[in-house]
Image: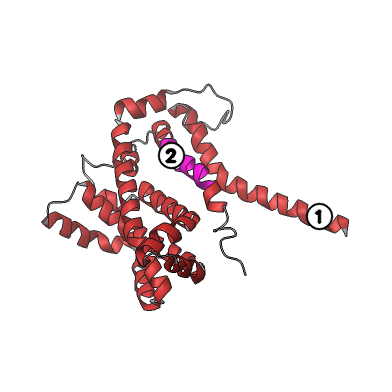
Amino acid sequence: MMRKKRGVNLLLSLLTLLVLFVFAFPFVWMLIASFKTQSQIMSTENILIFEPTFKNYLSVFREYDFLEFIWNSLIVAVGSTLLSLLLGLPAAYAIARHHLHKLGLVILVARIIPGITFLIPWFILFSQINLVDTYTSLILSHMLVGLPFIIWIMISFFEALPTEIEEAGLIDGCTHHEVFLRIILPISGPGVITSSLLSFIFSWNNFMFSIILAGDKTKTLPIAVFNFMSYSEINWGALMAAACIITLPVLIIALLAQKYIVSGLAAGAVKG
């Protein structure tokens, strides 16, 4: 019995390592390549043994003005996430508490429809009102996916909350708005953080909407990375360095928010 258990544990460990290798290999290769020259990247000899260089990172910031692109992506990602939370949290709470499943289905359909189908209508609309190459158009377009995503995550989260919490707040003299703001949202922290993080990641990495609606003033990081690829040559070193720079903020945010995501939901708030 013990041998069988050890064998199962060993098999699970091997499968875990295999999955980890599959997912981690592209990131590790990207990180290593960002410290190589163009010739070292193209060579198949001494893949792991080489003299590292920081020229790729210096080139990204000196020649391509990456700080401006980072600022543009930060404004769009934070703006779209905050507005999606402002509209999505009350909407999700209303759908969950009043059982508006048909409305929830409509929101789900809006999430399922491929975003590319909205590109031409978005471009025509924003062109008519002179909003192309503005933060407003990018934030609104990114909310097209971020807002339904937040609503659908939070609907199930709010439905899992016991109604006794709200009733206790109403008995204590709170209004429905105060119950939502002072009681429901604080104990829904893990769900809010999780949905916010995923919405932010989507906006931060979005390429499709930005390629159509962004211009020289509002060019975001995915569009800037695309500029490293030309018809005659691909600057692999700078491309890998730029990809690492894009990945780093999301990775830091995920690590910082991890304890909130895995923390219990209102542990001990209501029992029985």
Q: Which residue is drawn at 27% across and 51% down?
A: 139
Q: Nearer the viewer, mark 2 or mark 1?
A: 2
Residue 111 place in picture, x, y as percent: 37, 65
Q: Is residue 21 magenta?
A: no
Residue 254 place in picture, x, y as percent: 49, 45
Question: Magenta region, mostly helix, strand or loop?
Answer: helix
Residue 60 left/right relative to 42: left
Q: Dot 2 surroundings within 10 Å: few (below 14), some, or many (20 or more)? A: some
Residue 209 left/right relative to 150: left
Residue 140 is tagged as none
Relative to 116, is 49 above or below? above
Relative to 177, is 16 above or below? above
Q: Which amino acid does label 2 sit on?
A: Pro
Residue 7 is tagged as 1
Which stretch did the figure color magenta? 244-258
Using the numbered discs, state the Cα–Cα distance from disc 2 to disc 1 in whole angstroms.
39 Å
Q: What element carries label 1?
A: helix
Residue 179 place in picture, x, y as percent: 41, 63
Q: Name the residue under label 2.
A: 249
Q: What residue type is labelled 1?
A: Gly
Residue nearer the viewer, 74 or 164: 164
Q: Of the residues under marks 2 and 1, which one precedes in the sequence?
A: 1
Q: Which residue is drawn at 42% across and 73% down?
A: 97
**In the current view of this chain or complex, which residue is farthest to the front?**
172
Q: Is mark 2 on a helix, strand or loop?
A: helix
Q: Which residue is drawn at 35% across and 52% down?
A: 81
